[in-house]
Image: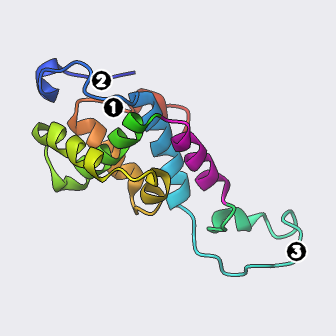
Amino acid sequence: MQDKSTPEDNGGDEDVLTVSPESVCFLIVKAREFDAKDEVTEPDPGSNPSDDGDIAVLEDHGDDPSAQEIRSFIHAMSIDERIDLVALMWLGRDDYSAEDWERVREQAVQEYNGRTADYLLGTPMLGDFLEEGLSLLGYSCEEFQTGRL
């Protein structure tokens, strides 16, 4: 599943991530589902979902299943894995380069506050940022995404 070129690409350390690339790839897919949601246009339509083409699933309701799944998945992670997610997102925003990984991760450790899921869900383009962060460290989600998107 990993598409890692050489250990030198990520600073010579084989295991730079605490979180598995597969877990990050899963979150990327779910984040893109969540990002595709539109604002709620009719909060209480009063109709049967099958009668209106079930279009409400495309709107960002508070009980959104994608958001709930992302929150549950992140809450089940260790603190180190959550820190990696935040650092990967920062890395993928073009704020840093792969050579800055240790510094970025240390900053994420210092700023950790236990609200990782809410922070990440509030970030537009989260899936793109996580994917770019993984890519900068030499990982790919190509195999993971095959058949899922």
Residue 12 placement, left or right of 132: left
Which corner quadrant of the image does residue 61 belong to?
Answer: bottom right
| Number of residues whose C-alpha sits closer than 10 Å to that of mark 1, classed few (under 14), some (14–19) or many (20 or more) | many
Separation (CA) of disc 2 from disc 3? 47 Å
Q: Which residue is mark 2?
A: 3
Q: Are marks 2 and 3 in contact (CB under 8 Å)?
A: no
x and y percent of residue 71 in the render? 56, 49
Q: Are marks 1 and 3 in contact (CB under 8 Å)?
A: no
Residue 75 forms part of the magenta stretch: yes
Q: What secondary structure is marked by label 2?
A: loop
Q: Which residues are magenta?
A: 64-77
- Amino acid on which the number 2 mark rests in the picture: Asp
x and y percent of residue 66 in the render? 61, 52
Q: Which residue is mark 3?
A: 47
Residue 41 placement, left or right of 98: right
- For the residue pair 105 and 141, the one nearer the viewer reads as 105
